[in-house]
Image (spheres, rainbow, N blue to C red):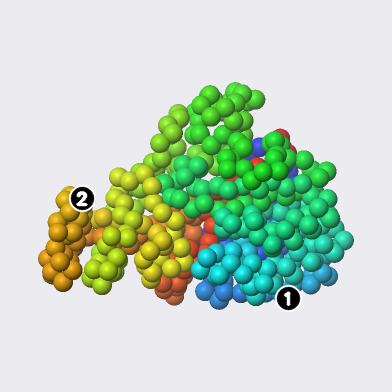
Amino acid sequence: MMSTPPILPPCRSGNLQEMLKILELYSGIGGMQAAAQESGLPFQVVASYEINPSAMDVYCKNFPGSSKPHNILGLSLEELTRLHPDIIMMSPPCQPFTRQGLKRDAEDARSSSFLHLVDLLRRVPQPPRMILLENVAGYETSQTREQLVDMLLHRGYAWQEFLLSPTQFGVPNSRLRYYMLAKLSEEPFTFTTSPEVLTEFPYCLCVQSQAFLESLGEPCCRCSRPVKPSLQLLHHKFHSYHHGSSPTNNLSSELPSLSSYLDTEIDLDGFLLSDKVLKRYYMLLDIVTCKSQRSCCFTKGYAHYVEGTGSVVQHNTQADMSEIYSKVQTLSEDDPLRIELLHQLQLRYFTPEEVTRLMCFPPWFTFPPTTTKKQRYKLLGNSINVLVVASLLIALVENK
């Protein structure tokens, strides 16, 4: 496994030649730059901004040629003018818009850096040509989003909002997120936009045969959406990461199983659910197996909190979960046989590496040895799905 990104291939779409200057804000562990890397588009990250030391360590390990991230509140109008990025890619803090974060929205102190950025974009002499933003579902009704839209109107942007999940991109993991694509009005989108928040990606996401890809201009025979060859190449590459090789002609609407995302060898001792968790939460667990075609969204509290933080794996697939749960529910709460029965399932947490795969980070992406397991779960829970963002980036940038 490589520790640094591979050299970028030339852009294969044939409609974009210039090097794109990307300003990466709230860079976290580098999901946005990984998405740009995987997209095949020619780019240069002119600066990145992040304040979490653990995230910065991961970022610098995977992108050693990049300058160390900075604090967004330190970004000045003069510096933004000097950087003059073509694209701003960002995933602002989501806590102000979540139930756990009390939904304080613009009044939350964690929104201050984003509001500072909006003010800079309102005043900068030459605004960036394009913006790609990711956040949690619910952001679309926030006051912070209203302030962003007001700036976009003021500066002459057109935009499209989405609510999308990796399951729509062929990944067996639910992670519904809000996305905004914005570009200056003189650079129109190549797909039909809507004032509504779209819940479908505008281009074909089916894995097509090479022969079909050569039939340019024809819509997909299954989903009827336009085919963009660069997106097909991206998805073929992703499938080669996790399924051995790109399928030659796969038009199945079924999601793949989790088997290609799970480690074949694992030290169970480090990942088995504790007796305390089993005893108290066994009825609240979302349990999957290697044959499952789904998994729940992983949050930053995964493996620390139980309810709503992500799925767990039934490692022993020979055991009958329904039968064991039926027996457990007939026993009293203090009966030790309850735990003995649940032990037979070998319920375990996904490893950080497995979560990394489900969030579509490429094989060359790694964590420093000093990053603890708890830190890895937290950093991943705060990150993005790379395949979804790479697909949106191509849809945003390519002009044909």
The amino acid type, in three-letter code, at marker 1 is: Gly
Which element type, helix, strand or loop, lies under badge 1?
helix
Q: CA distance from mark 2 to mark 1?
A: 55 Å
Point 77% across, 46% down: residue = 158
Q: Is residue 321 left or right of residue 43?
A: left
Pick the residue in front: 34 or 381: 381
Total count of labels: 2
Q: Nearer the viewer, residue 221 or 244?
A: 221
* Quarter of the image that includes the C terminus: top right
The amino acid on which the numbered mark 2 sits, given as a three-letter code, is Ser
Residue 372 lies, with reference to residue 172, above or below; the image says below
Q: Which residue is labeled 2 in the image?
A: 322
Pointer 1 residue: 74
Q: Is residue 365 left or right of residue 118?
A: left
Spot occupied by residue 82 in the image (x, y as percentages of width and height): 82, 65
Judge whether residue 257 can be spotted in this image: yes
Q: Which mark is residue 92?
A: none
Q: Position of residue 140 (x, y in %)?
A: 64, 54
Rendered location of residue 171, percent (x, y): 45, 46
Q: Is residue 394 something that shows in the picture?
A: no
Q: Position of residue 2 (x, y in %)?
A: 47, 58
Q: Check disc 2 and report its element: helix, strand or loop.
A: helix
Please tell me which residue lies in front, 316 or 209: 316
Residue plotted at (65% across, 25% down)? 217
Within 10 Å of disc 2 (Cα), the crowding (few <14, some 14-19, many 20+) is few
Residue depicted at x 40% and y 36%: 254
Mark 1 Cα shell of 10 Å, populated few (<14), some (14-19), many (≥20): few
Screen quadrant of the N terminus:
bottom left
